[in-house]
Amino acid sequence: MTLLVLLLTFYGMTVVRAVLVRRRTGINPVKLKPDDSVYAVTGRVLKASIGTWLLIALGYAFAPGVKPWLVPIQYLETEAVHRTGAIVAAIAIGWIGIGQAQMSASFRMGIDVSEKTALVRHGLFAWSRNPIYLGLLTGVGGFFLVAPNALSFGALVAAWIGIKVQVRLEEEYLLSHHGDAYREYQSAVPRWIGRRRG
């Protein structure tokens, strides 16, 4: 049930942020498109990964008999590992929520190359160029520790690959739209996390 609560918190927080941005700006912040572009394919990979986590959480909560079919990773099946994963995931969800709030009207899910949003450099973005994706990577790592099995490992790998590709795509987009301002930001703030340079 812990995994389900964590996932529903993450989903709910993200939906609320999207609704708030749409009300404030009149722009739909969900930019995931159903075409064959690399943006769309990466978005589908990430949605499939998150959807897989939801299926695993529902199975663990309401049909515990499916757990053996998911091929549990036995040496990770301890209370200490599960609790650690829940704590890591909860912290990551809080971190993501802060990052989403700090993006304010610039919050988007996906990329629309025809649109230009403000370059956010304050708060968590002063320490990481991608704090929301860093939170997602950390969160799915925590989810994996809560439910360590073959399927969740596959969802973790898919999320890791999807996020790494998405970060590169967004960097290209930001560089094309913000030019020298983004180059300066890249030189001052690491991609993932660390001390501000310069």
Image: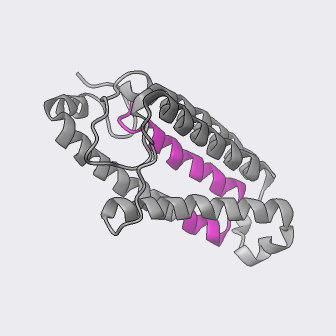
Q: Can residue 76 be spotted in the picture?
A: no
In the rendered image, residue 141 lying in the magenta stretch gets the answer: yes
Left or right of 131 on screen, residue 190: left
* Figure quadrant of residue 86: top right
In the rendered image, residue 79 lying in the magenta stretch gets the answer: no
Q: Residue at x 21, y 33 (%)?
A: 182
Residue farthest to the front?
A: 26
Numbered label tally: 0
- Name the magenta segment's main secondary structure: helix
Q: Can residue 144 be spotted in the picture?
A: yes
Left or right of 124 on screen, residue 174: left
Residue farthest to the left?
A: 180
Question: What's the magenta region?
Answer: 127-156
Q: Nearer the viewer, residue 150 or 33?
A: 33
Q: Is residue 116 above or below residue 120?
A: below
* Figure quadrant of residue 179: top left
Q: Is residue 156 above or below residue 28?
A: below
* Figure quadrant of residue 152: bottom right
In the rendered image, residue 29, in percent from the top left (x then y), is placed at: 44, 42
In the rendered image, residue 132, in percent from the top left (x then y), is placed at: 47, 39
Q: Residue at x 61, y 61 (%)?
A: 51
Q: Residue at x 80, y 52 (%)?
A: 79
Q: Is residue 141 above or below residue 55?
A: above
Residue farthest to the bottom?
A: 69
Q: Residue at x 70, y 47 (%)?
A: 8
Colouring scheme, one of rainbow, by chain, secondary structure, one colour = one colour
State which quarter of the image contains the C terminus: top left
In the rendered image, residue 176, in percent from the top left (x then y), is placed at: 18, 42
Q: Is residue 160 above or below residue 131?
A: below
In the rendered image, residue 124, in percent from the top left (x then y), is placed at: 44, 27
